[in-house]
Image: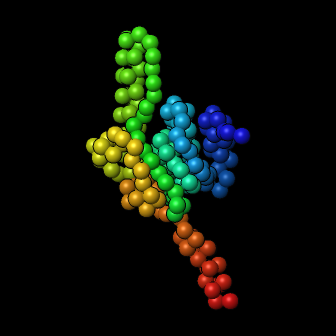
Amino acid sequence: MRRSPTRSSHSCCTLRRTTLSGISTCTSTRPGGSVYDGMAIYDTMQLVSCDVSTISVGLCASFGTVLLAAGAVGKRYALPNATIMMHQPWGGMQGQASDIEIHARETLRIQDKLRQIIADHTGQPYEQVARDSDRDFWMTAEQASEYGLVDQVHTATANPRDARILQAEAAA
């Protein structure tokens, strides 16, 4: 069953009340979706008092990339074979010329907002994000780490507990 953004936002609000040891996790295997639904999730992630950890598994694209970057600093991960893609918002519109113009202005406003959010969360200059997101910009997990979208590419040895288990197995 697909989770709706409203349900995801409600879950984050519930986490805000219970805090579950102060950490919630958002696993991101998102091909994107509605910008407005994504903004509801983003705003909720920023609102909750607990740290939100994000993990890219498989494909993380479009607004999924915004949510990946929006996790708590130090708690944004990608698995080694994750693929991350960012681009400008896109859509289609039919109708009267004036309606198309209104829609175009809104798309440009959203584009500016998304570029600023990514710049704020990655430390990249706005102009760099604008250039990179002008077309589909594909990254490996390592490239996403270098870009600042994630803090760490999570491997078995990235977790100290996992490293101890591997060392014990190797010694046995």
* Residue with the most extreme right position: 1
Which residue occupies the foreground of this view, 37 or 131?
Answer: 131
Q: Quadrant of the N terminus?
A: top right
> At x 33% / y 46%, what residue is drawn?
132
Could you tell me if residue 171 is visible in this image?
yes
> At x 42% / y 50%, what residue is drawn?
138
Tally the marks: 0
Can you say whether 74 is above or below 63 in the image?
A: below
> At x 37% / y 11%, what residue is drawn?
98
Residue 33, given in percent of the width and then of the height, sits at 54, 36
Can you say whether 74 is above or below 100 in the image?
A: below
* Residue with the most extreme left position: 127
Can you say whether 134 is above or below 90 in the image?
A: below
Residue 68, given in percent of the width and then of the height, sits at 50, 49
Could you tell me if residue 70 is visible in this image?
no
Residue 163 location, quadrant:
bottom right
Which residue occupies the foreground of this view, 65 or 40?
Answer: 65
Which residue occupies the foreground of this view, 161 or 129?
Answer: 129
Lateral position of residue 29 relative to residue 62, left or right? right
